[in-house]
Amino acid sequence: MAKVQVPVAVVAVGGLVGGYATARFTKKRPLGGVVLAVAGAVAAKGWQERAGGKAAAGLGAAYVAAFAGSHPLAKKVGAWPAVFGVAGAVGLASWVVADRRR
């Protein structure tokens, strides 16, 4: 049986969007943080395997920065546009660095 490989970009985007959606709709911010952290850990493992340690560190920093940066951005453009914007940026970076050659 062939192993299906999900692009790491999908995991990273899913973590950022899913973490926010979980926190918003359950009204339990820590639960959203769990979603964000688990997806981030899975993405970091994928980045490490596909692109190496330096790339994984850079993309991990971008993931954390996107989460942090979405908060002040949300005050200017709204919550969902901010989350989709930063998630898209991280997803694109992840695809370029780790997924494009697959």
Image (cartoon, rainbow, N blue to C red):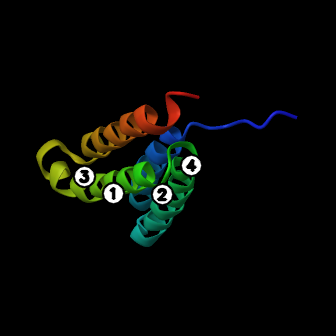
Residue at image position (56%, 36%) is 7
Q: Which residue is farthest top?
A: 101
- The answer to whether residue 15 is visible is yes
Q: What element carries label 1?
A: helix
Spatial separation of the CA atoms under disc 1 and disc 4: 15 Å
Which badge, 1 or 2, is on the more N-terminal residue?
A: 2
Spatial separation of the CA atoms under disc 2 and disc 3: 16 Å
* Residue 42, horizontal then vertical, whole percent: 56, 55
- The answer to whether residue 21 is visible is no
Q: Are marks 1 and 4 in contact (CB under 8 Å)?
A: no
> Which of 41/27 is in front?
41
Question: Of discs 4 and 3, which sits in the foreground?
Answer: 4
Q: Is mark 4 on a helix, strand or loop?
A: helix
Spatial separation of the CA atoms under disc 3 and disc 1: 14 Å
Question: Of discs 2 and 4, which sits in the foreground?
Answer: 4
How busy is the neighbourhood of tag 4: few (under 14 within 10 Å), some, or many (20 plus)?
A: many
80 sits to left or right of 71? right
* Label at residue 61: 1
Which badge, 4 or 3, is on the more N-terminal residue?
A: 4
Q: Mark 2 points at which residue?
A: 40
Report the quarter where the N terminus lies. top right
How busy is the neighbourhood of tag 3: few (under 14 within 10 Å), some, or many (20 plus)?
A: many
Residue at image position (67%, 37%) is 5
6 sits to left or right of 65? right
Q: Name the residue under label 4.
A: 46
Which badge, 1 or 4, is on the more N-terminal residue?
A: 4
Question: Of discs 1 and 2, which sits in the foreground?
Answer: 1
* Residue 39, horizontal then vertical, whole percent: 52, 55
Q: Name the residue under label 3.
A: 70
